[in-house]
Image: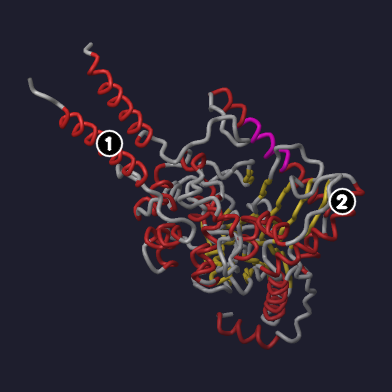
Amino acid sequence: MAPRLRPWIGAALAACVLIAAAYLPPRGGVRPRGVVFNAPRPSTAARLRAQALGAGLRAATAQLRVTEARAQLGSEIGRRAQDANGVVLLILGPDSLARRVKPTVAAALDTAWHHLGLGETKVAIVFVLDLAANPGSERTYVLPDSTDRTTCAVWQSGGYWIRPGHALHSGTNFASWLQNALGPCAFYAAFGSPGRPVRQWLGVRNFDLTLYPDWTSTERPDATERSRFGPRSWWWDAIWRSPPATIGCLGGRVPACRAAVLRGAVTSEDSGSRVVTMEGRWWFGQSLIPGERYLADVAAEIGPQRFLRFWNSPLPVDTTLTLALGEPIGDWTTRWERRFSPPLPLGPAAPLGATALSLLAAMVAIALAAMAASRRQVR
Amino acid sequence: MNRAGLMVALAATALTADAVAQGNRWQQQVQQQLARAVVAFRAQQFAHQELSRQAALDNEESETFLVTLQGGVPYSFIGVCDVDCERLALRISTATGNDIAVDQSSGALPVVAFTPTTTAPYRVTVRMAACRMSPCWYGVAVLRK
């Protein structure tokens, strides 16, 4: 190889490296596995089966505990519902801790109940706060069905918020945590049991659109939630694990938003299970980001009467939701998504930084070539 | 008794019905309505109350229960439901499932009159045909002369 060729080959390789660094995905910069606590582990078949078994065991345990709690409470549930105080609280765990936290938790639940505009409801809520739960347990809902149409039970572990040996949290975040813990049960209390199409649709999706039942707030989302999104803080771990329709909706594509909302809406099977279990890190792989507040925002926008007609309608979900929103689902959802984040850049368009870097590299290469050409002497 | 007559009778007996109200307000509505209906039908010679049943159903759900009726005796089946209920349907059939009497109305106060030819168990099916907010409470009373 001629010695004069080496610098050119080196320059070409360097330019290739620069271009590769700029263009090769992921553009958002996925963090290396193991550096952060929430780095996902590889999903092998054995791991998936173990996770499914664990989820089943936790759901069964939670249902058993709720059943025991309801038996223990007996007629208290009916009496409390009659008193227009729809939440019946039962705290499991060490007596001293239970006695200490009960007034605070009861007051926070009462505040949440009134904040949601609830009074006497057809469906009462039994809130079982388990302070002796094993780590990893999060939250389980036992929804009303034909064996008990008037009680919706929440089983909630103390988790981070209530721990032995720690001071009890209070304030807005604690109250929000408890209110969000009511989840789909709050919808059942406010709007009754859903009609068959909505029940089937939500059952297939594990009631993911009803997890944050705040249909009264005027300022949504708060700073904490916004921090999950935005061009400087895209949560790439969550985004790359989301279905294509979810990412398309984040990118502002109307058909993708419609598909993300209507996932599971065409099923004909009625979900047999009345138990809905929320695992830790439930937000990974969401069908809609942030879907946990979607139906609460729909209710807030269209009002309780129209939302009740949608919730209880015998019509297919796409029809009744379109009627309730008064416009195509995809259009409304795309606009709703923009409240949380700017559009996620999609498609083959080069990012601004990468384009600038490439142009710079090209300019340097041209300049070097021009310099070499100007010094070249023909003999 | 036709439906208009029943409504008038219910209104007339509204203040005299001696309902023992229990449960939430929707259950209380059903208890009170059923008590008034029974009082109104007693004035029409249906003196004996054979059965009274109250429960909750979600929209478009139905429930069936058995009742033994005596041959040759006129019976009246009365259904009532809470304020969120828009349509309640009542159907009487044999134990093998053949329909004998059906309330043809489209309201929330079905009434079925039926005189069985033989003494046998019969099936009473209650269907919550339209309920604005589920579940809706209903009550059914079976009266005989």
* Residue type marked 1: Val
Going by the picture, which residue comes out furthest to the right?
Answer: A96
In the rendered image, which quarter is residue A243 located in?
top left
Q: Main secondary structure of the magenta part?
A: helix
Q: Chain of mark 1?
A: A
Q: Is residue A76 left or right of residue A192?
A: right
Badge 1: residue crowd in 10 Å (few <14, some 14–19, many ≥20): some
**For the residue labelled by badge 1, is the local secondary structure a helix, a strand or a loop?**
helix
Q: Residue at x 30, y 22 (%)?
A: A10
Q: Chain of mark 2?
A: A
Badge 2: residue crowd in 10 Å (few <14, some 14–19, many ≥20): some
Horizontal and vertical percent for residue B108? Answer: 57, 73
> Can you identify the residue that label 2 sits on?
A98
Q: Residue at x 76, y 65 (%)?
A: A110
* Residue type marked 2: Ala
Q: Earlier in the sequence, mark 1 or mark 2?
A: 2
Q: Magenta span covers which residues?
A: A52-62
Going by the picture, which residue comes out furthest to the top?
Answer: A1
Q: Quadrant of the N terminus of chain A?
A: top left
Horizontal and vertical percent for residue B127? Answer: 56, 61
Disc on res. A364: 1
The residue nearer to you, when weighing A152 against A255, is A255
Horizontal and vertical percent for residue B20? Answer: 80, 74
Q: Quadrant of the C terminus of chain A?
A: top left
Q: Residue at x 56, y 80 (%)?
A: B3
Q: Is residue A165 above or below residue A118?
A: above
Horizontal and vertical percent for residue A367? Answer: 23, 36
